């Protein structure tokens, strides 16, 4: 049975009762337009000991820039709800925009350093919107394990940092990227791609695969691993925001190999912007 | 029995157990140097239905400006603990600076509009420090009723706004100012005053008293009420940051009488800065 809750106080009361009876809440924040990647996060809740799974659906205006795709972002609530029912989600939390940002709203949270580079360079107000909405969602849920997809790798690191810095009673976990059989990372924005763009989009996974294989063969030079990733992406995509090998936790740029490195990619096909990544030596072959 | 807890996770576990057994947590955040004003906040916890009172003591570096009194702020932990014992505080939460702001800390919360004027003009980074530390403290406590002194009137309004904006499970209440028999509002900073300054400090209460009496006699003009407050303060104090009548909730400046008005004062005696206020038609005669 999947129930829909719209008010933050009703959600908090529900989750308090779960905790009061010794059970654990799992929480998956989403913007809807659900796909198998999201469903894997629901499954991860149970794998991490949650007895009850709450999934939120809210297309958060605060995290879209003025020229981004807020108005055309896919809104598929009925299909989302059906997927949640099938996946055994207990609560879909679907607050209204007015509930989230009522008249007079004026509070924001910012994580300063780890948000500055990469996505922060190209989407300067994005993470302020993400951290603010996730803090509100976490507060409405209360103590929980909260699962994020590692496709938004920087987001996952930013939110982990926020939870730690603010003493939030939230265990933040990142779940592996789910890919289509041909390697494309699942994304709500893949719906924007026509057949030609869908084909060209594979270049990111191809680049990450080349880096993965080189790493497996002993390559550790971050510049070389970047180049291997960049080559197919540069050929297939219309423009590239970044292809970078950075430190996996701090996301600092690397001048030398680090024990833990992640390759991060953001690039455009027409008006569609895709991101993907690979944590070297950890993630499976894309 | 008063216990001292130093770690946020231990505090959260303690408070969860209180809530799990159907009891309510009251929370009073302080910077120590406790006086009767703080003790009135402890009493207010019980009056508002709290079964357990948590009082935090942490001199928060983030809310002091570079030329303010962080280093000389009075630190009187043993006397504070004795006062807490006598007042029936259940838990003193005393985190270390390293626990609150460990290496790599980079997250801040800001309430934007209501913080800009008044204290915000003279202490531009102050409220960012206050909201960040109080959010951390609230997260370590969990759902509670949290009591603030209305002497820091703007602070109380800022924190109320933050709790609402962020969907925090915290009921924020303001308790009346506690005054010395001669009218001086109690403050940890009163310890800085020598006998001469202590005498001159009374000018604020005298000014607010004049405004109180004029309001009781029918005066509603915000400029006139400001002037009545200002006159004794201008004579006795070395410099004045502001004496203003503003809207009691939004703290917006007034060009005409409002249903709910507060007079706010900040002024200096030598290196000591004092604040005080009066909500007209609500607060007792200073």
Image (cartoon, coloured by chain):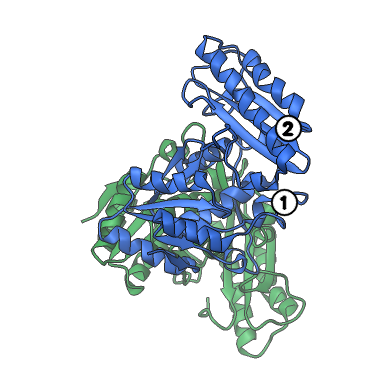
Chain colours: A green, B blue
- The front one of B192 and B101 is B192
- Chain at tag 2: B
SS at mark 2? strand
Q: Residue at x 66, y 56 (%)?
A: B61
**Disc marking residue B69:** 1
On the rendered structure, is A214 left or right of A84? Answer: right
In x, y percent, where is residue B114? 59, 34
Judged from this view, the residue extending furthest toward the left is A1
Q: Quadrant of residue A35?
A: bottom left
Q: Which residue bears the numbered disc 2? A: B241
Q: Quadrant of residue B276?
A: top right
- Label 2 and label 1: CA atoms lie apart by 17 Å
- The front one of B68 and A170 is B68
In x, y percent, where is residue B189? 65, 46
On the rendered structure, is B217 left or right of A138? Answer: right
On the rendered structure, is A129 left or right of B119? Answer: left
């Amino acid at each position: 049975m999947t129930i829909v809750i719209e008010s933050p106080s009703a959600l908090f009361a529900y989750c308090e009762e779960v905790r009061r009876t010794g059970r654990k809440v799992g929480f998956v924040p989403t913007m809807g337009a659900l796909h198998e990647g999201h469903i894997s996060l629901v499954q991860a809740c149970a794998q991490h000991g949650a007895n009850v799974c709450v999934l939120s659906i809210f297309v958060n205006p605060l995290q879209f820039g003025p020229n981004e795709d807020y108005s055309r972002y896919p809104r598929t609530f009925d299909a989302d709800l059906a997927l949640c029912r099938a996946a055994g989600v207990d609560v879909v939390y679907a607050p209204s925009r007015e509930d989230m940002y009522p008249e007079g709203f004026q509070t924001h949270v910012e994580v300063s350093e780890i948000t500055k580079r990469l996505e922060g360079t190209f989407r300067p107000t994005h993470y302020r919107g993400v951290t603010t909405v996730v803090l509100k969602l976490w507060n409405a849920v209360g103590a929980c394990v909260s699962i994020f997809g590692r496709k938004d790798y920087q987001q996952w690191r930013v939110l982990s940092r926020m939870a730690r810095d603010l003493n939030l009673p939230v265990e933040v976990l990142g779940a592996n990227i789910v890919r289509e059989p041909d390697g494309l990372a699942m994304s709500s924005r893949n719906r924007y791609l026509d057949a030609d763009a869908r084909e060209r989009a594979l270049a990111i996974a191809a680049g990450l695969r080349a880096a993965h294989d080189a790493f497996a063969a002993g390559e550790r030079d971050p510049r070389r691993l970047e180049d291997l990733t960049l080559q197919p992406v540069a050929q297939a995509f219309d423009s590239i925001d970044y292809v970078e090998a950075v430190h996996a936790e701090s996301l600092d740029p690397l001048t030398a190999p680090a024990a833990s490195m992640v390759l991060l990619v953001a690039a455009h096909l027409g008006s569609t912007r895709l991101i993907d990544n690979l944590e070297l030596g950890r993630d499976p072959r894309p």
